[in-house]
Image (cartoon, grey):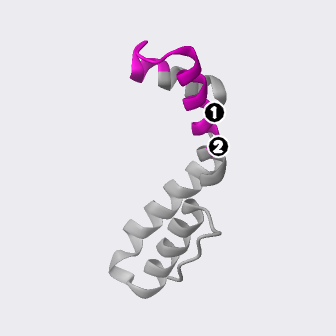
């Protein structure tokens, strides 16, 4: 697999899974599952409300409002890039 920093991590996972499918018949079933999961992740991106709920449940009020908003916005950027 070529290293291409311009490609999203999901695309890299899909490429690697397809290479495994092509090159290792005994691994094809597991690689197909990985490709399927990566495709599902790429298609389904959590919205701001879901990310806020995740942060609230995880951090349990330990963040200031400014920190909470910054973390939510950062996760939104990460999710966009990962797709």
Q: Residue 12, how many percent across, how many down? A: 54, 69
What secondary structure is marked by label 1? helix
Position in image of residue 50 (x %, y %): 58, 26
Residue annotated with mark 2: 77
Q: Identify the residue shown where x is 65% and y is 28%.
A: 48
Whole-percent x, y for residue 61 in the image: 43, 12
**Height in image: 80 above or below 31?**
above
Q: Quadrant of residue 8?
A: bottom right
**Is residue 83 shown to the viewer in this render?**
no
- Residue 54 - label: none
Q: Disc 2 on helix, strand or loop?
A: helix
State the separation of the CA atoms marked 2 and 1: 6 Å
**58 up-or-down from 33: above or below:** above
Q: Main secondary structure of the magenta part?
A: helix
The residue shown at (59%, 65%) is: 11
Nearer-the-camera pick, 50 or 62: 62
Task: Classify 10 Å Cα crowding around label 1: few (below 14), some (14-19), many (20 and above).
Answer: some
Which residue range is magenta in the image?
A: 56-77
In the depicted view, which residue is nearer to us: 17 or 83? 83
Q: Residue at x 50, y 82 (%)?
A: 1
Q: Is residue 47 left or right of residue 28?
A: right
Q: Which residue is mark 1?
A: 73
């Amino acid at each position: 697999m070529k290293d291409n920093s311009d490609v999203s991590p999901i695309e890299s996972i899909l490429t690697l899974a397809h290479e495994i499918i092509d090159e290792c018949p005994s691994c094809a079933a597991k690689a197909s599952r990985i490709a399927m999961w990566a495709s599902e992740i790429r298609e389904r991106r959590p919205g701001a409300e879901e990310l806020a709920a995740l942060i609230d449940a995880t951090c349990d009020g330990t963040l200031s409002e400014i920190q909470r908003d910054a973390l939510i916005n950062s996760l939104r950027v990460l999710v966009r890039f990962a797709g």
